[in-house]
Image (cartoon, rainbow, N blue to C red):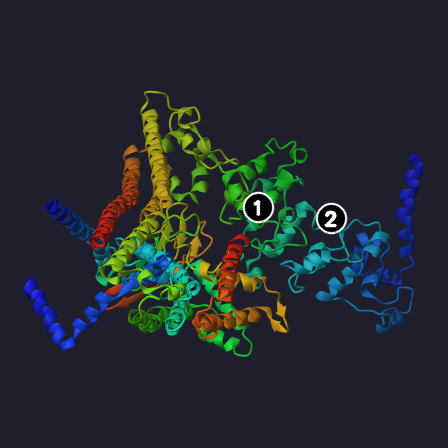
Amino acid sequence: MRQLAVLIISLFIFIPALSQTKDGCYNCHKDVGDKTAELYSGDVHFKLGISCADCHGGDRTSDDMEIAMSKEKGFIGIPKGGKIIDVCLRCHSDDVVMKKFNSKIDVNQFKLFKASVHGKSEIATCVTCHSVHNIKKVSDPASPVYPTSEVKLCSRCHSDANYMKRFNPGLPTDQFEKYKTSVHGQRILKGDVKVATCSDCHSAHDIFKANDPRSTVFAPNLPKTCAKCHSDADYMRGYKIPTDQYEKYVQSVHGKALLEKGDLSAPACNDCHGNHGAVPPGVKSISHVCGVCHALNAEMFSRSPHAEVFEKKKIPQCEICHGNHLIERPTDEMLGVSTKSTCIKCHREEERGFEVAKQMKDMIDTLVVRASKARAILDEAEFKGMDVSDARYEMNDVPQILIKARTVIHTANLDEFKETIEPGYEIVDRVIKAGLDAIYEYYFRRWGLGISTLIITVLVIALYLKIKQIEKKK
Amino acid sequence: MENQKSSRRNFLGYILGFGFLGWFISVLYPIVRYIIPPKMPEAKVKSIKVGKVDDFKPGTGTIFKFGNKPGILLRLESGEFRAFSAVCTHLDCTVQYRGDMKAIWCACHNGVYDLNGRNISGPPPRPLEAFRVIVRGDEIYISKEG
Amino acid sequence: MAKFGEKLFNWFDERYKIRGFIEFMSHKSVPQHRHSIWYYFGGVSLFLFIIQVITGILLLLYYRVGEDSSYESVQFIVSKVKFGWLIRSIYSWSANLMILAVFIHMFSVYFTKAYRKPRELTWVTGFLLLTLSLTFGFSGYLLPWNELAFFATKVGTEIIGSIPVIGKELLIIVRGGEDVTGATLSRFFGLHVAILPGIFTVILFIHLLFVQIQGMSEPPEWEKLPPEKRKYIPFFPNFLLRDLLLWLIILNILAILAVFFPWDLGKKADPFAPAPAGIKPEWYFLFMYQTLKLLPPKVLFIEGEFFGVLVFTIAGILWLLVPFWDVKTEKGYRNRLINYIGLFVLIYMITMTILGYVLS
């Protein structure tokens, strides 16, 4: 059985090898010591019996150089620019030909490449990445697009500031440098080929700009791209990190904003972890990372008594209360001293922090309750047909004051908090008064009507009697 | 008998007289109140007067009410006026002018707009809606049509 | 005091001979019979018209016509101006009640055949007043520039476009452009507050003058009655006091309607928004609108809509000319045909109006 297998495999290897001996181009070029021909013997195409003439044209059966490399026989010499692509896609875009070689390579590669950001022949062709005459399978460590080599391959252009200026002066050229600082980069330098390289995130042939919705690194697409590996428990086995980040992120306030509402300003994985330099943010840098968007919260936190204590005790700043991947919309429940509160994780009764948390929570609850009461009054007034649009306008400020107050919590400073929230009470008071005035006006109208109806009724009766009187007189 | 009749007639006359007077007042009162113009300025959404030129120092921003939404009037260091809707395009917070940043800033999520109202950093997805500022004499008017 | 009044009276009489007029008025009488209740509807219409004039002028104090001020100023009136809600609601309610009163007035005159000689021209001026009232209603409906009014006007004016040859041009003239825009609003406003009131007042004056000169019409049956069996009440003060009584009641009804059913302003018109469901003209146009809707697209080689317009126009002209072709009544015969036609028209209008509300 085993012998049979060896026989079949050796047949597959030798039959094409034998056939090469009939290839006039290869034989002749090899004989004259052409380095290209020597190189080609290691090429994946050579092993499949593809002749020089299959790419360069001409007649491989002829021994006469004049005939073999004549235009009549279709010789094209060294293809340049777009011609290179034409040569490759003659086979690689034709699934019939590719099937003949039992290839599983996607025949759409060229179409994808053409549409991509590199799709102009003066930027890159097939050989720019896959090399020429020495093309190896992607899984072959000798291939220039094998993971360990690929990062260097891409950086050949992308780290060359002078070169990149010609195409996209605005694009940074430090991706490779950053990549080397990332967990991915560190590992690949140690030879771990399972980690993400350029093409794992950016894809290979269909690379688009990061702000192109077709791109695999376009913000709403990015979490899935990362999840390809990071949510695959089998694949990630051995790295000792959780694989539920994506699942959690999708349910988080950020994930919902980005993926459901399409809010491009919401952070994807890279906004916290970095792009090319992807690492988990350190304990100290969390508030800085979050503070990029949540500026006030971060600034206020940094001057709170918490900042110092957290640093000393190595407590992850924002994360301790808000979590990391599953950051839900914060609720007022997180504040205060109830069982759902995060404050009581550290603070105990009769402590000052406990008191502050309790008071802050009470004040926010009061404003929320009174604001909803004010809204109910306005609703009632509107239901009664009264116009309270001015009061409604004033109400606009209340949610904003609530946002501010909920931000000021991060200072843990009760005075500052009171200063922020108190205008809210004043507004609500005024709105409630305006609403009640409107409702009062509604009843005033009815009273006015009642009085005038009474007057008219009396008048009508008197007039009726008068008419009777006049008619009786006659 | 005759007396009684005439007193009844008199009584009816009084009722009629006072009734008409009362009725007349109850008709006239709303009309007079209606004619007296209300203290509030007339509802104008398209353009409003925000104040005098001297009320605004160069390098400041002021929030004003435009219809039922807030607007922001900037006076640049150069003395030029600009006005925008003050509703942040991210989550509808009210933006403010930050002299230190020389920018319009939203406190909620650190959104920053430049002094042309363009969103230059942070989460805001769109620029602020621009209003037209008209300086007539020393009065400043703001109108919606840019 | 009394002396002063007398002096004043004499002063006027010397110059304007008002004594004769007073004499004439004091002898004026109103026939009294089982149908005399219908005499009051003319007065009711007049009273509602007066309310229209007063409240209309009051609204003009704050109303500012224009695409971006009409709606806002009406909103300002109803929300910010003291009693503005009351004035506007009374205005809208009395406008609708006035149309209703005018219709009742017309049908009562028709069925009691009060239009017959010598009152043909009273009928004609009355009919003109009715059409003017309808035009008032149509032009006024657009003025708040709200969604319903905007689309109702769009649909309503579109009918004009169905007239062959000149329809298109006519539509542009009416709308002040291809579409219902701010230009239409200005046009309708001018029509509503300047042109129509002017014409209306003149015709109304003539109409009232005719009534005063000729007095109230007596029912046809009275011609066979001996004079002593005909009952009259003096116009002044008896009839006038009754009128006044009714007017007071109506004013109170208006106030009640205004407080309990304030006239809705709705949303501001947005020409680019899709038409909301259930766009209908005012109730008094509904029978015409519904008829046009039910007509097939083609009737006898002419477009259905135009056919409808044509029929309504011819019917209107025939209606206007009733006193001239109804020769039987004039000669003292009972003309049942008139009753049948009137009944048919009345039932047709009511049915179509109901259908208009039910079918949509």
Q: Depth check: A423 or C114 in front?
A: C114
* Three-letter code, disc 2: Val
Tell me the quadrant of the picture where the C terminus of chain B can be found.
bottom left
Would residue A224 be found to the left or right of residue B22 on screen? right
Query: Foreground residue, A121 or A321?
Result: A321
Q: Amino acid at mark 1?
A: Tyr
Residue position marked by numbered label 2 in the rendering: A138
Residue at x-position 32% and y-position 22%: A351
Q: Chain of mark 2?
A: A
Quadrant housing the N terminus of chain B:
top left
Task: Work out whether residue C244 or residue A79 is closer to the camera in this orientation and state it.
Answer: C244
Please tell me in which quadrant of the rendered image residue A49 appears.
Answer: bottom right
Query: Does residue C274 show up?
Result: no
Q: Which is nearer the eye, B56 or A461?
A: A461
Residue at the image position 79 percent from the left and 53 percent from the top? A43
Tell me the number on the disc at residue B135: none
Residue C165 at x, y percent in the picture: 55, 79
Q: Choose top left, top right, bottom left or bottom right for residue A344.
A: top left
Does residue C172 appear anywhere in the picture? yes
The dot on residue A179 is 1
Image position, residue A421 (x, y; %)? 31, 38
Q: Report the chain holding disc 1.
A: A
Disc 1 residue crowd, few under 14, some 14–19, many 20+, Cα 10 Å: many
Q: Are marks 1 and 2 in contact (CB under 8 Å)?
A: no
Judged left or right of residue A102, residue C181 is: left
**Sequence order check, earlier mark of 1 and 2:** 2
Q: Is B61 situated above or below A435?
A: below
